[in-house]
Image (cartoon, coloured by chain):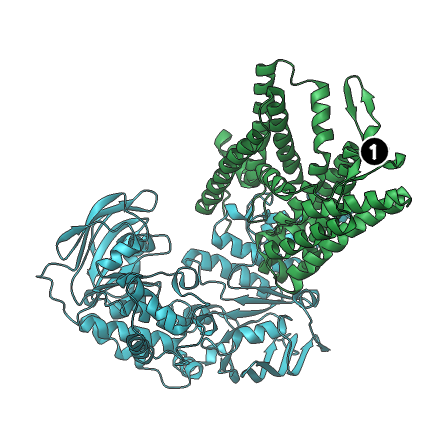
Chain colours: A green, B cyan
Amino acid sequence: MTVIEAPAPAGRAGTVNRLLDRHASALPSAAAVVILLLLLAGAQAYFGNFVTPRVLSALLLDNAYLVILAVGMTMVILTGGIDLSVGSVLAFTGILGARMLAGGTSPLLVVAVMVLGGAAIGLMIGVLVQYFDVQPFIASLAGLFLARGLAFVVSLQSVKVTSPGILWLQSTRFQAGDWYVTPTGLLALAVLLIGAFTLAYTRFGRTVYAIGGDEQSARLMGLDVARTRVLVYVVSGVCSGLGGLVLTAYSGAGYPRNGIGTELDVIAAVVIGGTLLSGGVGYVLGSLVGVLVYGTIKTIISFKGAEQSWTQITIGMLLLVFIVVQQVIVVRSARRR
Amino acid sequence: MNPANPTAPAAPAVAARPVVEMRGITVRFPGVLALDEVDLRLRRGEVHALLGENGAGKSTLVKALTGVHGIDGGSITVDGVERTFASTADAQAAGIATVYQEVNLCPNLSVGENITLGHEPRRRGLIDWRAAHEQAAGHLRRFGLDIDPRSALSSHPLAVRQLVAICRAMVLDAGVLILDEPTSSLDRSEVERLFAVVRDLRDQGVAIVFISHFLDQVYEISDRITVLRNGRLVGEHVAADLPRGELVSAMIGRELEELETIGRSAARSVDRTTTPVLRASGIARSRALEPVDVDVYAGEVVGLAGLLGSGRTELARLLAGADAADAGTVAVHGTPVRLTTPHRALARRIAFSSEDRRGEGVVGDLTVAENILLGLQARRGWLRPIRRAERAAVVAEYVSALGVRPADPDMLVRNLSGGNQQKVLLGRWLATAPELLILDEPTRGIDVGAKADIQRKVADLAEKGLSVLFISSELEEVLRLAQRIVILRDRRRVGEVESRETDLDGLVGVMAQTPGATAGVTREVL
């Protein structure tokens, strides 16, 4: 029988080729890591006191809710979809939780309601996308308006949270030298790890990638496309609910105007982290790096005492560069064939 | 390329009871009876060709068997048990695997994952990647594929992906393997490799369904042939007992010597003393085409012959302005021009019909009329609308001249068969009144009847003075239509030949660089 030769692994060039053949899709995420390291190194050189346990610990604490949202968003984008509802759902579950706590409901029940509320809105979006063939953009836009409206129905004003159980999530600090981590940070890391494992080691996770690569093929391979797609929006909704919990704990209050535009920050972080908007390529850990890049830029700008609008300008420019880089990679890989 | 392969073994004796028996299968689509009481019997250890024109119901029959479409009547028996499949997963579980025309794999995943996805080995609920890749490597080796299972599928050429798709299909030890047009994008050596695998599987007792438009390949590989026409069963035959002429007649339902009647075109002589309509000198594009010269004279059909990847499509795209050339000059009627966009080419009356009919040709969600008018409107510019009466006249003219079926200008193009889409596309470019028409694979994957229609139209138009640059993988077609053939190999021009001075073997000899067999060909590069 004829044997097809693999591209001859000739020394170093062969190894590089093999690496590229295997891991070309990880290049954008690797680029994000490089950018993060450059940012940290640059900030350290400029300020002298930037890369310290205190600042880095605060980075995770301040952006824990973004990390959680990014995990759900990454899954949705991997299927080739988008979820614009996350910011509003975060506000809705947050204010709902705060209101219930103020009414004396037990914190555990409140957390369950917040998570389920997020899941319900995610389920609605997923069903619209899968069974009614609505564009993810439009379906999640509907979710955005619905959740924002519901948030205002729950309360027009900020509702303060006094429940010690919820505040504990934020105020407790597990210290190791100058390093510390709060329960909210641990929750974010746990969601991140579960997300990464699910995507890498479960059939559900691989189906997510398959849908993003070629939905038709995924279906013909006998994979459960319908269930998986609905489920990613539910997961994103759950993440929004958890994000609402973390943000409520972080700010000590629920506020119906929370998270306006957060969906776009999350999408930016996910894209900077190396996930292709066309789907099928990306990693949750890359999205963590994306969030950290975002957070680092924010921190640098507050160190500098400059206007926070510079964060948005910088993120915008980074995003532009990343999308161009991704496009080049996509075109290259199409040409390599 | 002999019509009946004498070495094809007779059906083994074990093939007594069919492994799959479809009886009286009826499938209705809104307004159409797609299948009308069709039977199909598949036996172990046999390659069974399923043939018919486009729209004959081959795909529908396959989809009925694999659970994509439900059936409105009839029964499907697998291993003696009557079954109904609700999904492809169901059919796969029953041992019926399918490899579709467009390789249905995920390019973003690794080769190994594409093979094992859906039934990957798991440990404590989590996918065991090491075992999965080892398993995949084992399957790849079985098919003589020595590639890294961890490499991304997108890093491999189409032919390898096709074999990976078959590999995937066979992981579950399927008893039935359906290959839907597996060879349409493979070159000759890749087809050989595929067939080696198919024969191997056949000898292991797999029942194989082979769907193809290439009759040579059908005779080369098949033991048995079932012919469908217009959703009905025409007959089941032992391949060796069915002469090719009868097969073609059975497929199209009338005696077809029509293709032969077009034969006059190539013999017609063309006046080459005038200024050529198009003269390209040293036209090139890095990584796509080495410098090439081509002349096309008025009323001449110039064929471009070469294997897939020889540069024939690249040359066509440069001349059409679809890609911009890095070097070389192009003159139209002796005037130097720069063809950097299709729009500029169109302004010079050069029209281009791409090989990618769906991607770069027809717009599926527009009607026949709109598709035909697109080219004309583009040439006139958007600010000068075409009057309604003129529009209707243009559309009616080309729909009837090209024989588009159904002849309904308001039909959405995506609902037409491939052959009719191609006719619409041809109509679009003819409506722009081109002087040079570049046709890249205009007859690929379309049925014999439409093929004959298109070839006849091209020959007629050339006789009336249109210049045509004609590309086709089917060399008979090129030899029949073109007066002159330019041969490309490895992105270079390697020869030029007058059609009447050569034959298939001469052409193939130069294309494949076989010394000796080069009757009448002027060889330019060695």
Q: Position of residue B32 (x, y in %)?
A: 53, 83
Q: Position of residue B442 (x, y in %)?
A: 35, 66
User: In the displayed structure, would residue B109 be above or below residue B360?
Assistant: above
Q: Position of residue B244 (x, y in %)?
A: 40, 78
Chain letter of disc 1?
A: A
Q: Residues within 10 Å of mark 1 (few under 14, many from 20)?
A: many
State the residue at coordinates (54%, 73%).
B59
In this rendering, is residue B386 above or below B285?
Answer: below
How many marks the image carries: the answer is 1
Q: Secondary structure at mark 1?
A: helix
User: In front here: A218 or B398?
Assistant: B398
Residue A197 is drawn in which quadrant? top right
User: What is the residue that sits farthest to the top in this orientation?
Assistant: A48
Q: Is residue B463 left or right of residue B159?
A: left
Q: Nearer the viewer, residue A294 or A34?
A: A294
Residue B445 in view of the camera: yes
Q: Which residue, as the protein is rendered here, is positioned at the far front?
A: A157
* Residue name at image x 28 percent, y 59 percent: B304
Is residue A222 shown to the viewer in this render?
Answer: no
Q: Is residue B42 above or below residue A250?
A: below
Of the residues shown, which amino acid type is indicated by label 1? Leu
Q: Which residue is mark 1?
A: A169
Residue in front for this viewpoint, B62 or A129: A129
Looking at the image, residue A221 sits to the left or right of residue B9; the answer is right
Q: Please state if A94 lies on the left or on the right of A297 as rendered.
A: right
Question: In x, y percent, where is residue B502?
Answer: 22, 64
Q: Quadrant of residue B258?
A: bottom left
Q: Residue at x 64, y 33 (%)?
A: A289
